[in-house]
Image (cartoon, rainbow, N blue to C red):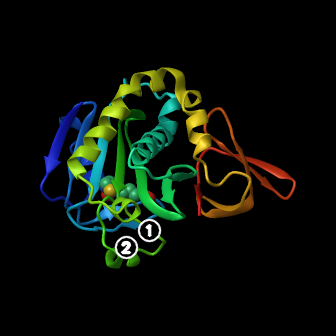
Amino acid sequence: MKFQYLEEIDSTNKYAREKLSLLQDKTVVYTFKQTEGRGRLQRKWNYLGQDNIYASIVLKPDNEMKEVYANMTQYLCVILSQVLEEYGIKPKIKWPNDILVNGKKISGILAEGVIEKNVLTGLVLGFGVNLNASRELLEEINQPATSLNLETGIPIDCENFLKKLTDKFFLMYDKFIEEGFLLIKDDYIRRAGFLNKAVTVRVFDKELKGIAAGILDNGALRLIENNKEHVLLVGDIL
Ligand code: BTN
């Protein structure tokens, strides 16, 4: 694993994608000042000040498109939850990869594949974690949000958090590539806050409403809409 610190950048994901050919496999690009962070569903990722993490893990697989890459965000989501738990809080996962505490978002993940000539040349796994945010800035976000300092009542050391997280991520990484989602399925489900509840799922430009009935062995969401079953590999619970 290597770290690349950027003093200020528009988006660590954008930077990592643009500089992909110069970055080694398992490089963690990070900054404490990200000015134009991007999220899923064309959302932006607000800048909440220098005491929060904005980072992207660069992965350069061996040019072979493996099914497991589709589950990489769920893997990061479990690892992030485990690190947050070390601070004494109880995060919940919203499929596929949002992390909430008491119904408020504390972390988001944006995975972007770089494909050249039909070959996956890299995967940029971006994540933001609210570690030390003020209530005022959190209120400016267009969905309920929280941060670790507010949940624990103590200031959080960002460098230390990032080190814990990335160490844990790469400790199990090779095993995860070998074994796939099944390796983390139980850990994922234990933290899933959405199961057996009524949910709305955005899938591309469609919205499906139903009961989140389960998570399959490949990480897909089983959604029951009236009496119709959907097995969703992509999408976002809204
Ligand atoms: C989401 O919840 O919609 C995903 C948010 C991902 C934000 C992170 S911050 C670091 C990296 N760079 C970006 O521009 N976005 C991701």
Q: Residues within 10 Å of mark 1 (few under 14, many from 20)?
A: many
Residue type at tag 1? Ala
Give the residue number, with chain letter if any, for mark 1. 145
Quadrant of the rendered structure where residue 215 is?
top right
In which quadrant of this rendering is ligand 1 seen? bottom left
The image quadrant where one finds the C terminus is: bottom right
Residue 23 visible at all = no
Q: Position of residue 196 (x, y in %)?
A: 74, 53
Give the residue number, with chain letter if any, for mark 2. 138
- Of labels 1 and 2, earlier in sequence is 2
The circle drawn on residue 153 is none
Is 138 rendered above or below residue 203? below
Front-lying residue, 39 or 184 = 184
For the residues bearing labels 1 and 2, Cβ distance under 8 angstroms:
yes
Front-lying residue, 151 or 18 = 151
Quadrant of the rendered structure where residue 103 is?
bottom right
Instruction: State how far apart marks 1 and 2 are (Cα).
Output: 6 Å
Residue 236 visible at all = yes
Front-lying residue, 159 or 181 = 159
Secondary structure, mark 1, is: loop
Is 32 rendered above or below residue 170? below
Secondary structure, mark 2, is: helix
Q: Residue furthest left?
A: 7
Kindly identify the residue that appears in the image at 51 percent across and 37 percent down. Answer: 71
Kindly identify the residue that appears in the image at 68 percent across and 37 percent down. Answer: 216
Residue type at tag 2? Leu
Q: Residues within 10 Å of mark 2 (few under 14, many from 20)?
A: some
Q: Position of residue 80 (x, y in %)?
A: 41, 45
